[in-house]
Image: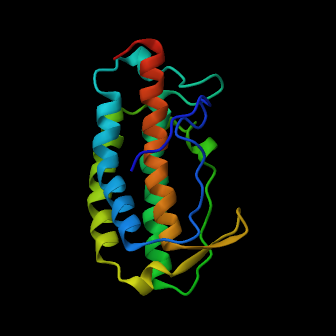
Amino acid sequence: MAQAQTTDPCYPIGKFEAPTSISEQQRKEWIAAIEEAPRRLREAVKGLNEQQLNTAYRDGGWTVRQVVHHVPDSHMNAFVRFKLALTEDNPTIKPYEEQKWALLADVNTPIEVSLQLLDSLHVRWVSLLKSLKEPEWKRTYIHPAMGKTIPLEQVLASYAWHGRHHVAHITTLRKSKGWN
């Protein structure tokens, strides 16, 4: 599922737009995007040296290293939120301060640690996603920071976008710097 490239370095594939109606085919495409995300992230950072990993993808933005560590942080939260919504009645999830997480000391661990974490996490997450039946996609959670009740199928769409969004941060930077 292709998304248009933009000239906004913050949103190289455009901002996420929540779908208003969702088909089974769209869910399959989004699950495939989540399944491919670890491989695509690995490809995006392949061959980068330490200096390149410590380069911000845009002025005022995170470094490539921070982006790589952010993706599994975010996707772990999403995985837990899915499980909460599947096992509780419209739970209120716990938001997290992603900007502050990106500054914690573990951002200095080798990116391979987060790449392996993402690989393993996505195997479990995709297994769960592929098992869901129609009524389960309609289950919801409350996101207090957004002030919204969100159905799981919409969360699926946003995380399919999320993986592509951050891979595009890195691939766009590589292209602009001639690192290909």
* Left or right of 62 on screen, residue 79: left
Residue at x-position 30% and y-position 36%: 42
Seen as rendered, the residue at the extreme top is 178
Quarter occupied by the C terminus: top left
Q: Which of 163 and 108 lies nearest the eye of the viewer? A: 163
Residue 104 falls in which quadrant of the image? Answer: top right
Residue 106 visible to the viewer: no
Rendering colour mode: rainbow
Residue 89 drawn at (x, y percent) = 55, 87
Residue 10 drawn at (x, y percent) = 61, 34
Residue 24 falls in which quadrant of the image? Answer: bottom left
Residue 150 drawn at (x, y percent) = 60, 72
Say how many tags the image has: 0
Residue at x-position 58% and y-position 51%: 16
Residue at x-position 55% and y-position 78%: 140
Q: In the rendered view, would you say 110 is above or below 89?
A: above
Q: In the rendered view, would you say 153 is above or below 104?
A: below
* Left or right of 174 on screen, residue 32: left
Q: In the rendered view, would you say 46 is above or below 94?
A: above
Residue at x-position 64% and y-position 22%: 59
Residue 72 drawn at (x, y percent) = 42, 49
Residue 39 falls in which quadrant of the image? Answer: top left
Residue 154 visible to the viewer: yes
